[in-house]
């Protein structure tokens, strides 16, 4: 009678995630307690009687019942045993279930857990210790465990949702244009890049480990030399990126840019131009001139400039022509942009000076400075 009562204790339904954890626990050769507890639950879910389970794992039937009751009440965490929590002087091992909890905490909302907007390694470690998920872990080992789980720090970005009532129509029109080149036409994406101020811009440079970058930029407060705008065009057929610099970007300057763009191509070739809904683009004089000169406009939806393929071209131009710079005149800044565009459009080689010449010039200046110094 007593044996039949013991065999009536059954495990509840095991979720797929719990079953994966139990199988990992069963394979823990260095933690026999976790391995046997997982075997008890898995065998019970397979229909094996409690008395037979007790014989296979060398437990008493009463202890088998207690393990099943713990799992049914509190889940996998109730049947786990982590010896490193009690022994601080022995080598610590972080088993798969503990690493999974660490990764789960790192991917959870820090605002909900610690009342801050982002994690740091020290704050993540403090939270894990306070919740008794681990007893102690070094920052380097915590970073290693996170990398093994494929967790990296990522930058968040802003995103503006488009509420244009004609979003669907404009989107389909642009997708159809990007999918195939119209017969007798040319696809061109245009946009304004700027305003371009004369200001120091931070960036990246190579330096040896433990050394600070040699380059330093001044700090500016007053910028009295005005701004420039770069009216750019990206030819989807040739992959060329080009444009004009202007002091303003009102509709007369935009119309002059359109005339210059039109003059670059044969008059019988239709220009299919992708652009945004900026006020100067939809000026009546501009629309009338475009219609008379074989130009068709494709407007992106409001707050959906990502549909204009010239946007991704500006990122590289900004990185290689403007970042880590301190231009003192607009002509110097425009020259740097034109130099990058010349390389990008395959109009020049990557090198503008040979390494031997550069090394000789810098070696000579270094010797001169050493001779002058006391």
Image (cartoon, rainbow, N blue to C red):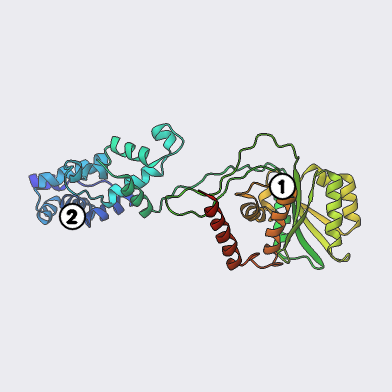
Residue displayed at 10% across by 50% down: 59
Q: How packed is label 1: few (under 14 Cα within 10 Å), some, or many (20 or more)?
A: many
Task: Find residue 107 and report its image quarter.
Answer: top left
Residue extending farthest to the front is 374
Q: Nearer the viewer, residue 180 or 127?
A: 127
- Name the disc covering residue 301, or none: 1
Task: Find residue 352 and report its image quarter.
Answer: bottom right
Q: Nearer the viewer, residue 317 or 362?
A: 362
Query: Circles 1 and 2: CB distance less than 8 Å?
Result: no
Q: Nearer the viewer, residue 19 or 270?
A: 270
Q: Position of residue 114 (x, y in %)?
A: 39, 33
Q: Position of residue 57 (x, y in %)?
A: 12, 54
Quick check: 129 above or below 212?
above
Q: Tell me the SS state at disc 2.
A: loop
Left or right position of 328 against 40: right
- Is residue 100 among what the camera can see? no
Inter-mark Cα distance, 1 to 2: 60 Å
Q: Nearer the viewer, mark 1 or mark 2?
A: 2
Marker count (numbered): 2
Residue displayed at 17% across by 41% down: 86
Residue displayed at 28% across by 44% down: 137
The residue labelled by disc 2 is 30
- Is residue 338 among what the camera can see? yes
Q: Position of residue 36 (x, y in %)?
A: 17, 52
- Name the disc covering residue 78, or none: none
Query: In terms of sequence position, does the residue under pointer 1 or pointer 2 come before the other?
Result: 2
């Amino acid at each position: 009678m007593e044996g039949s009562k013991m065999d009536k204790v059954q495990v509840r339904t095991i979720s797929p995630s719990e079953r994966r954890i139990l199988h990992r626990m069963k394979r823990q050769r260095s933690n026999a307690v976790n391995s046997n507890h997982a075997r008890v639950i898995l065998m019970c879910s397979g229909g094996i009687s409690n008395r037979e389970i007790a014989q296979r794992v060398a437990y008493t039937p009463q202890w088998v019942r207690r393990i099943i009751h713990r799992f049914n009440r509190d889940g996998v965490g109730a049947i786990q045993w982590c010896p490193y929590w009690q022994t601080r002087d022995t080598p610590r091992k972080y088993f798969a279930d503990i690493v999974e909890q660490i990764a789960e905490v790192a991917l959870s909302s820090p605002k909900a857990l610690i009342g801050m907007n982002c994690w740091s390694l020290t704050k993540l470690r403090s939270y894990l210790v306070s919740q008794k998920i681990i007893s102690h872990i070094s920052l380097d080992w915590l970073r290693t465990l996170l990398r093994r789980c494929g967790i990296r720090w990522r930058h968040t970005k802003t995103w503006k949702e488009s509420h244009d009532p004609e979003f669907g129509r404009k989107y389909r029109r642009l997708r159809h244009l990007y999918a195939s080149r119209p017969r007798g036409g040319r696809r061109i994406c245009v946009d304004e890049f700027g305003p371009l101020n004369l200001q120091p811009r931070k960036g990246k440079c190579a330096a040896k480990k433990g050394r600070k970058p040699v380059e330093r930029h001044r700090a500016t407060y007053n910028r009295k030399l005005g701004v420039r705008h770069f009216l750019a065009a990206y030819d989807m057929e040739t992959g060329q990126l080009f444009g004009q610099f202007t002091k303003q970007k009102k509709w007369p300057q935009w119309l002059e840019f359109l005339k210059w763009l039109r003059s670059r191509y044969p008059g019988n070739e239709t220009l299919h131009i992708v652009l945004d809904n900026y006020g100067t683009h939809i000026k009546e004089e501009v629309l009338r001139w475009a219609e008379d000169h074989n130009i068709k406009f494709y407007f992106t939806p409001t707050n959906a400039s990502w549909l204009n393929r010239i946007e991704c071209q500006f990122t590289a131009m900004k990185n290689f022509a403007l970042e880590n710079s301190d231009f003192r005149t607009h002509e110097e800044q425009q020259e740097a942009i034109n130099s990058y565009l010349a390389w990008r459009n395959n109009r020049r080689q990557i090198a503008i000076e040979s390494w031997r010449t550069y090394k000789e010039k810098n070696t000579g200046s270094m010797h001169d400075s050493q001779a002058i110094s006391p």
